[in-house]
Amino acid sequence: MPELREGCIRLARQAGAAILAIYRQDFDVTAKDDRSPLTAADLAAHRLIVAGLTALAPDIPVLSEEGADIPWEVRRSWRRHWLVDPLDGTREFVKKNGEFTVNIALVEDGEPVLGVVYAPVLDHMVHAERGVGAFLRLPDGCDEPLRTQCPARAPLRVAASRSHLDERTAAALARMGEVQTFGLGSSLKFCRIAEGLADVYPRFGPTSEWDTAAAQCVLEAAGGAVLALDGSPLRYNRKASLLNPDFIALGDPSLPWREWVVGSGEPAAGSR
């Protein structure tokens, strides 16, 4: 596993360099079938990462956002697979605000066991391995361990922009009491929680499995949790659809999150 993790870190950096080469010039933006944006940077990073993972571990299949047309009849037999978002936060990429990441995760029996999240503009690399820990890779190549803020302290720091709140998120924030909110793109929201710089990220709306797996591994290894609204951890490749359920990410899993999400569309009853 350490060799796989270092290989993923190298690939994330290489993909980040390919992305930045396009980011620093004018580029075209097209729309995919779901109307989400697509750029040459998404495709360049996808090709680089898929080729690199295939060379690194030829026996492990790769599921990438830009190559997600793999039938469920094939995927359902996978015990292990790579789950990749070559450019998480394409809208942030198009806005040129720097808040986008490269996400690479290894999933075993539905659980993310290795995760790498790299923000190229910030040169910010976090990585994790289940049972080992979560780390920030420093410029000198050393690793700084990451831990969530536990117990959480008031006011809670919540990854949710007040200017872009849906009704369910606004209701959850109201139930939390005194909070400090901030907006941030892509998987960086999970990373800020893992680093102890934020406490909660509620997500009521569509996300895909490649959006969350790597960052979930990082957050869980740092002491946090990513839970569906029934209290179960997010799991992967368990169904034909690649969409996640609504979820909440927590730095302190003991927070009374069930009270916040009541009436959010999925019952909290039966949660653990």
Image (cartoon, helix red, strand yellow):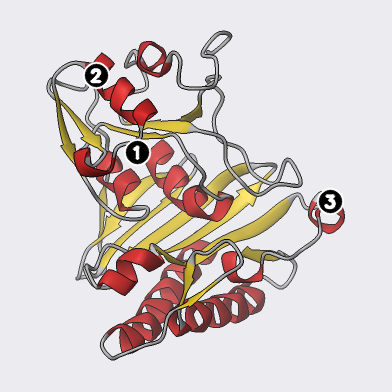
Mark 2 or 3, closer to the camera = 2
Q: Residues within 10 Å of mark 2 (few under 14, many from 20)?
A: few
Can you tell which quarter of the image residue 159 is in?
Answer: top left
Mark 1 or 2, closer to the camera = 2
Q: Residue at x 24, y 73 (%)?
A: 96
- Amino acid at dot 1: Ala
State yes or no: discs 2 and 3 in contact (Cβ < 8 Å): no
Residue 189 in view, yes or no: yes
Q: Residue at x 70, y 47 (%)?
A: 241
Can you tell which quarter of the image residue 70 is in?
Answer: bottom right
Residue 1 in view, yes or no: no
Q: Sequence-wise, which precedes: disc 2 or disc 3? A: 3
Residue that carries the numbered disc 1 in the rendered image: 222
Alpha carbon of mark 1 to alpha carbon of mark 2: how far? 27 Å
Question: Where does the image place residue 169, in percent across and percent down from the top left?
Answer: 34, 29
Question: Where does the image place residue 207, in percent across and percent down from the top left?
Answer: 51, 47
Q: Residue at x 44, y 34 (%)?
A: 204
Alpha carbon of mark 1 to alpha carbon of mark 3: how far? 30 Å
At mark 1, the secondary structure is loop
At mark 2, the secondary structure is helix
Q: Residue at x 52, y 49 (%)?
A: 213
Q: Is residue 65 left or right of residue 11?
A: right
Quadrant where the N terminus is found in the figure? bottom right
Q: Sequence-wise, which precedes: disc 1 or disc 3? A: 3
Residue 173 vs 191, above or below: the answer is: above
User: Which numbered marker is on residue 77?
Assistant: 3
User: Which numbered marker is on residue 174?
Assistant: 2
Alpha carbon of mark 2 to alpha carbon of mark 3: how far? 43 Å
Mark 1 or 3, closer to the camera = 3
The foreground one among 205 and 7 is 205
**Farthest residue toward the right?**
73
